Amino acid sequence: MGKPHVLVIPCAAQGHVIPFMELSRYLTKQGIKICFVNTEFNHKRVIHAFGKSVAENGLLQLASVPDGLEDGDDRNQLGKLTESACQVMPGHLKDLIHKVNASDDDKISCVLTDVTMWFAVDVAAELGIPMAALWPASVFQLVFNLRIPKHIDDGLIDENGTPLTKDVFQLSPTTPVIHPPNFLWLNLDPFPSTQKIMFDLFQKNSKAVETADWVLCNSSFELEPEGFNLFPKILPIGPLSAANRLGNLSGNFWPEDPTCLQWLDQQPPASVIYVAFGSFTVFDQIQFQELALGLELTNRPFLWVVREDITKGKRHVYPQGFIERVGNRGKMVSWAPQGAVLQHSSIACFISHCGWNSTLEGVSNGVPFLCWPYFADQFLNQSYICDIWKVGLRFEKDERGIIGKEEIKSKVEGLVGDDNIRTRAVELKQRVTKSVGEGGNSDKVLKDFVEWLKS
């Protein structure tokens, strides 16, 4: 009998590709072969960021399929990308499986799909291949999506996903606070057509969950007990970032700048503000400048990840004289090796967009948060951080809708000076680390999954 051979297909977003790559690398260490499928566009980005070919004991192969868009199309238009991918990817995926099976002694024995890639469920079923699904965000967000029919029956939303209430609510006292305008499908994009496409997509999440032999989630029972209790078929295997300290190939879309690690080595313990907003957040020029001035006002060392495309329109412009005034106290990079940064002893706090990967990396390292959500599930993750786990603080916008420099300075001082928050962050880290350690909840599920793949 040959090796188990898993075809892995994440959704085409940075926040999905990274946990899928983390799980894939874990599986190769157990002797399982992986065919990792990105869209052609993202495949090129990962190869460029990685800088060389992949050899994960020879067990990890990178493959790609078209997403149906042209080279110059804007892939941040999520509605357009989603529609196109759902139309063209199933056929290409089928062809890829046939091609792999024809050329490899180890045939594809399992399809591991992103819950949002519902069409992969049909492909696996048609070809008679066992299937597992991974949800790379919080289990509570998935449970909320799976309950869409109930939300309609309860009068929370109509058949198109439009909120019928403005009231803030919670499903239980230990789950995040939900603001109806922040429903996932409403805040991915301002266009109603995109909102409808995404609402329909999230309703199809249930297809993958009902059909899959395994439904895994990059979370832990220690972080979200109520979420896992609400839907016992979904099993925790996270945080994958804590279980699997990465080597070079992380699934990043940007080349990392390792010089920031040497800079961190020169800073005092627990002194540095780490500032990073993931792969999607975009600021207008006024907000970008207020953030720069706020970091300057703190009088603390800061490491700031400034992507080339972080501001709307023209390239970002720092306030006049800012670079000279902050000198070596500020370090700006276009992309950072975030796992290594958050493990560093010099980090005092994390100004974050609260994407789930960043949330898990901060929590796994006991780092307190200042929350600056942008879209998607980030508002829900902010509620976990501030309301449920109590390991961070929110920023408040002023009358212009801007987070001002004085607010940034004030919240940094408030957070860094709060010993209770730091203590809770360390305690949460210990609980989460235990879940992925030998015999922990997430560790047991992962090992059982590996046994199933090998059987």
Image (spheres, grey):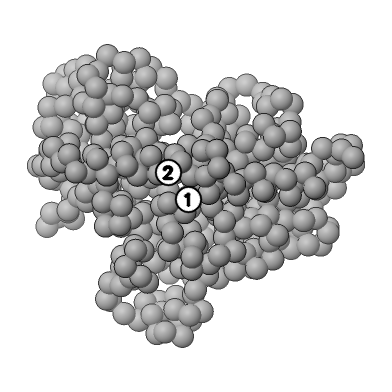
Q: Which mark is residue 211?
A: none
Q: Residue 97: x, y in percent?
A: 80, 47
Q: In the rendered view, does 387 fall on the left or right side of 220?
A: left
Q: As rendered, which of 327 and 251 lies closer to the eye?
A: 251
User: For the N terminus, which image quadrant?
Assistant: top right
Location of mark 2 (residue): 432
Q: Residue 417: x, y in percent?
A: 13, 37
Marks 1 & 2, CB-CB < 8 Å contact: yes
Q: Residue 324: x, y in percent?
A: 16, 19
**Which quadrant of the view contains residue 368?**
top left
Q: Amino acid at mark 2?
A: Val
Q: As rendered, which of 29 and 22 lies closer to the eye?
A: 29
Mark before the other along the chain sequence, 1 or 2: 1
**Residue for point 37% across, 77% down:** 163
Location of mark 1 (residue): 220
**Residue for point 17% across, 36% down:** 416
Tell me the SS state at disc 1. Answer: loop
Tell me the SS state at disc 2. Answer: helix
Determine whether 424 is above or below 44 in the image. Answer: below
Q: Residue 213: x, y in percent?
A: 70, 60
For marks 1 and 2, give the CA distance: 7 Å
**Which quadrant of the view contains residue 128?**
bottom right
